[in-house]
């Protein structure tokens, strides 16, 4: 079972104005939004899916992770291969 995060696109024009692109009207009744880079959003979705499929032993063994380390590095620390990540992407 894949976990889906509701999302839309926030587009910035040359003048710096932001426009919410939400064709499914997921956010029509919302007053506030958070913008996340698209590759980070995919990483977050993959991490949530991997948490749901993981036995949590690997998570306990991660230890302290430096704040400057990219979020994507968690996959390597957790022992995921490129094939594992590709399979997680198929579930999205």
Image (cartoon, rainbow, N blue to C red):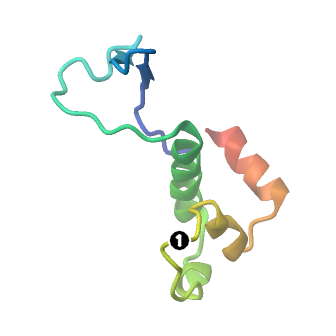
Q: Which of 51 and 68 is in front in this view?
A: 68
Q: For residue 58, say whether it is visible.
A: yes
31 sits left or right of 80 in the view:
left
Q: Residues within 10 Å of mark 1 (few under 14, many from 20)?
A: few
Residue 2 location, x and y as percent? 56, 44
Residue 42, placed above or below residue 57: above
Q: For residue 1, say whether it is visible.
A: no
23 sits left or right of 56 in the view:
left
Q: What element carries label 1?
A: loop
Residue 49, placed above or below residue 25: below
Q: In which quarter of the image is residue 77?
A: bottom right
Query: Which residue shows up at 59% across the image and 88% down it?
Result: 61
64 sits left or right of 19 in the view:
right
Residue 89 location, x and y as percent? 69, 43
Residue 24, placed above or below residue 43: above
Residue 27 location, x and y as percent? 28, 23
Query: Which residue shows up at 65% across the image and 41% down it?
Result: 91
Q: Residue furthest front?
A: 15
Residue picked out by circle 1:
68
Q: How many marks?
A: 1
Query: Which residue shows up at 61% across the image and 38% down it?
Result: 92
Query: Which residue shows up at 51% across the image and 52% down it?
Result: 44
Q: Which residue lies furthest to the top in this view?
A: 23
């Amino acid at each position: 079972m894949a976990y889906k995060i509701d999302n839309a696109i926030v587009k910035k024009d040359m003048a710096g104005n932001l426009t919410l692109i939400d064709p499914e009207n997921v956010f029509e009744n919302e007053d506030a939004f958070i913008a996340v880079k698209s590759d980070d959003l995919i990483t977050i979705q993959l991490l949530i899916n991997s948490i749901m499929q993981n036995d949590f032993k690997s998570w306990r063994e991660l230890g302290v992770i430096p704040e400057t380390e990219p979020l994507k590095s968690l996959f390597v620390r957790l022992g995921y291969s490129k094939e594992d990540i590709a399979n997680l992407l198929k579930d999205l």
